[in-house]
Amino acid sequence: MGEADVAAASLPVLRPCGLEQVPAIREIFNEVILTSTALFEYEPRSLETVTAWLEAKQAAGLPVLGCFDGEPQRLVGFASYGPFRPFAAYRLTVEHSVYVHAEHRGRGVGRALLEAIIAEAKGHGLHLMVAGIESTNRASIELHRQFGFRHAGTIHEAGRKFDRWLDLDFYEKRLSVDPPPPASGS
């Protein structure tokens, strides 16, 4: 194998997650819940909860993109988006999330996933992407800034975890400049 072959073999693979990834998604979710403030939750998610979450995403046609690495291919991170708010006028705005396995942080997985989920949203004609990031999560904030997200506001003391108040920063990125096609009631 030449140098280019080795480099290509070491690149992570991005593809949609299926039900076979539920245990790995659950592992990533639960590590984040138990060790960080990236998710404002206290209790680990059950296998049934994560299965229902993925099935709901699939049924709604919403992406759950996985980053796979190594042989055999192992899920090392995932990204998704969903409706920002459940009202018709928000139909072109989504809120996204990116989660990376603890052993793979700082290796470009989050960058690859964020780039892919932005491209996915643009490909579906969405207009605005929103991120809710706990205000001390400097790595996530910097990554989003590198992709052109701008600070849109802070909700102070939005949550409480690990015996402290958490501020929630919102970041936004405009994906399109063209007006959307008309919708009923617009």
Image (tube, grey):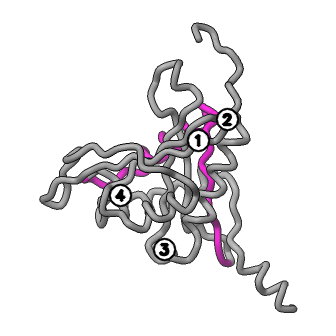
Closer-to-camera residue (90/46): 90
CA gap, disc 4 and disc 3: 14 Å
**Mark closest to the chain's N terminus, 4 or 3:** 4
Residue at 55 percent of width and 45 percent of height: 173
Which residue type does callout 2 highlight?
Val
Q: How crowded is mark 3: few (under 14 residues within 10 Å), some or many (20 or more)?
A: some
Quarter holding residue 35: bottom left
Which residue type does callout 4 highlight?
Ala
CA gap, disc 3 and disc 1: 26 Å
Q: Which mark, by number, is residue 174?
A: 1
Residue farthest top in this picture: 185
**Mark closest to the chain's N terminus, 4 or 1:** 4
Q: In this view, does 61 lie above or below 16?
A: above
Element under disc 4: loop
Q: Are the two marked residues, 2 and 1, in contact with CB atoms closer than 8 angstroms?
A: yes
Quarter holding residue 72: bottom right
Residue farthest left in this picture: 163
Q: Give the range drawn in magenta.
A: 42-70
Q: Which mark, by number, is residue 105?
A: 3
Magenta region includes residue 48: yes
Residue at 67 percent of width and 35 percent of height: 177
Give the residue at mark 4: 38
Residue mark closest to the camera, 3 vs 2: 2
Tell me: 186 left or right of 131.
Answer: right
Q: How crowded is mark 1: few (under 14 residues within 10 Å), some or many (20 or more)?
A: some
**Mark closest to the chain's N terminus, 4 or 2:** 4
CA gap, disc 3 and disc 2: 33 Å
Q: Quadrant of the C terminus?
A: top right
Residue farthest bottom in this picture: 2
- Counting labels gives 4
